[in-house]
Amino acid sequence: MLEQGTFIGVFDGEDLVGMGGCRVLQMRACTHRAEIGAFFVTRSRQGRGVSDVLMNAIRDHAASKGAWQLELFVAEDNPRAKRFYERHGFTVCGSLPNAALVNGIMTSDLFMVADLR
């Protein structure tokens, strides 16, 4: 993500309270697409608008690079994150079974897409 994309941070003074990665796809046929990588807001700032600021900055960045489709994966067992992304115009388009193995437990991801046009 660092080599091909951008990380955007949200700060409170000098404290980093949120960060997200965005990468516009490089293949000529796919430059209309951008993907969100890591998206994190410190627990103490969740539910206080930081996530909205960060998502809006990512959307603006992707659009400024010519992308009009934004994509991400979210853990299927994270309903709060799913609701947040839906509020920002994302819809579920598919799933990735067995996406991660954490502490011996297999989890699946949902693939979500938003149209920025």
Image: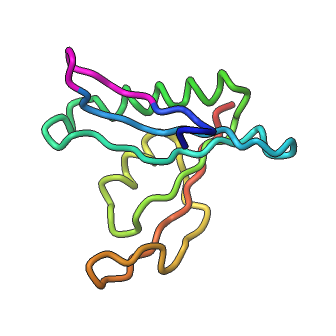
Residue in view at x 37 percent, y 51 percent: 83
Residue positioned most to the front = 3
Residue ID at (37%, 46%):
84
Q: Position of residue 70 (x, y in %)?
A: 61, 42
Residue 100 or 1: which is nearer the viewer? 1
Compare residues 109 and 47 and report the one nearer the observer. 109
Q: How many marks?
A: 0
Give residue 4's quadrant in the image: top right
What secondary structure is the magenta-colored segment mainly?
Answer: strand
The extreme right residue here reads 29
Image quadrant assignment for residue 92: bottom right
Q: Quadrant of the N terminus?
A: top right
Q: Position of residue 28 (x, y in %)?
A: 86, 41
Give the quarter of the figure containing the C terminus.
top right
Q: Is residue 7 left or right of residue 78?
A: right
Image position of 67 with respect to 74: above or below: above
In this view of the protein, which residue sits in the foreground, 33 or 85?
33
Occupied quadrant, residue 107: bottom left
Residue extending furthest left?
44
110 relative to 13, above or below: below
Write the residue at 36% across / 35% down.
19
Based on the picture, tell me whether residue 10 belongs to the magenta stretch: yes
Q: Which residues are magenta?
A: 8-15
The colour scheme is: rainbow
Q: Is residue 12 magenta?
A: yes
Q: Residue at x 54, y 52 (%)?
A: 72
> Horizontal and vertical percent for residue 10?
33, 25
